[in-house]
Structure formats: structure tokens, C-alpha cells
Amino acid sequence: MSDRRALALAALALASAFCAALLVARWVYSDPGAYRFLGWNLFLAWIPLLAAVGVYDMQRRGFRARKLVPLAALWLLFLPNAPYLLTDLIHLGSRDDAPLWFDLVLFSAFAWTGALLGFLSIYLMQVVVRRVAGAGWSWALVGGSLLASAFGIYLGRSLRWNSWDFVTRPEALLSDVWARVSDPLGHPRSFGMTVAMTALLSVMYLVLYAFAQLPAGERASR
């Protein structure tokens, strides 16, 4: 494992531990179990990153592209769970058993950590695709994955679908997906939310990507 990747994973583990500490502190202060869905959502956000690390390592070891497909599919299936944490901010202020400023820190920490987990997984997959198929296809992957994430966020937040429903209830899920994909303007909420979230995620990813391309010394000096 490269030093840069190890440092990134360690930083994300630290951020996740900070999120967990905030959540436990809130339970101690007020109601045990409050906002416990944040912990579950953060756990799900780690799955695409771990899958992307697996794909990255397999490709470096010389595995053929078709061998990477199952793990890449798992990555894409769970990817929306990472930026989904951004939308958990909708619950901010829904309880009054702790100071609002603390809940703001709590939700912001989870949202930021979830987004970073997702973006790092996309970055690793982009590197893999660039090596296998070239820069153009790597950026097509980025655009497609961000669009899929935005649509997945809509499916989860508005229609309450989960990633595992693709396995347990595929017909019903695909029916809802096809209804909106085949007639996007007939579902304005779906269309608007997907476009807005795609734009937000794209800007965030491009900013982080730009910083990732700076030489280490230049990043430090800035």
C-alpha cells in the first residue's frame, strides 16, 4: 500500500472515529440511540471505498478486467450511500434534547466524512479505468457514477429504497427506476433533485480532484 493511500485511509478512519465519538457523546448527554441511523449510514458509506480499494489492488496485480466486474458492481451499487449522508442534514433541528450547535457539528461531521469516502472511492476507480481504457473513459466513469449517485440519493431519500433492495426486491425497484428514467420530465421532483445533486457532487469532486493533483510540497505551501 502506498504511503499516500495509507494516509488517506487513516485520515478517513480518524474522521469516522470522530463521528462515532460525537454520536456517543450525544447519547450520553441526552437520549441513547438518538440519530443512530447516522452510524449505520456511515458504515454503508465505507462499503464502496473498500470495494474500490479491492478493485484497485486487483488491477495492480494484473487481474483481467472481467475479473474486476463483480467488485466494481458492488462499488457502484453501494456508492450512493456515501454522499447520501449529505442529505441527513434534513434531520437537523428535528429534536430539541441537545443544543442545536452540537447537532450541527454532528451532522456536518457525518456528511463531510461520507462525501469524502465516496469521492475517494470514485478517484480510485477513475485511476483503474484510466490505466485500462484511457483518460476519456475514466472521466466518463466519474460523470456516470456521480449521476448514478445523485439518482440513488433521490431513490433513497424520496422513495425509501435501499441498495440491498436491488437483490431482495429487484422488480419493484427497477419498475420505479424505469418509470423515472423513461419519462424524467413527468417526474419533476426526481429530475430536479437528480440534476441538483449531480451538480453539487460534481463541483465537490472536481475541487478535491484539483487539490489531489497538486504536488505535495505545493499543497503544503498553500
Image: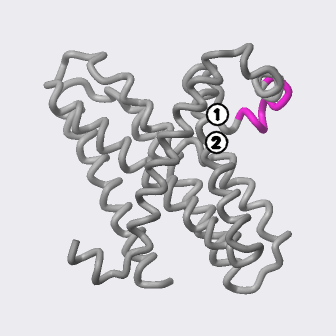
Location of the C terminus (image quadrant): bottom left
Q: What residue is at 69 percent from the left and 57 percent from the top?
A: 141
Q: Circle 2 — which element?
A: helix
Q: What residue is at 65 percent from the left and 61 percent from the top?
A: 139
Decide: few, some or many residues near mark 1? Use Cα within 10 Å; few <14, some 14-19, many ≥20: many
Q: Which mark is residue 147?
A: 2
Dividing the picture into quadrants, the one containing residue 185 is top right
The residue that disc 1 covers is 151
Image-based side of 192 in relation to 218, left or right: right
User: Which amino acid lies under the numbered mark 2 shown in the image of this protein?
Assistant: Leu
Residue 72 at x, y = what percent? 72, 60
Marks 2 and 1 sit apart, C-alpha to C-alpha, by 6 Å
Q: Which mark is residue 208?
A: none
Residues shaded magenta = 165-172
User: Which amino acid lies under the numbered mark 1 shown in the image of this protein?
Assistant: Phe
Residue 21 at x, y = what percent? 25, 47
Number of numbered discs overlaid on the protein picture: 2
Residue 101 at x, y = what percent? 15, 30
Q: Is residue 131 magenta?
A: no
Q: What residue is at 65 percent from the left and 24 percent from the top?
A: 191
> Which secondary structure is most common in the magenta stretch?
helix
User: Which colour style is shown?
Assistant: one colour
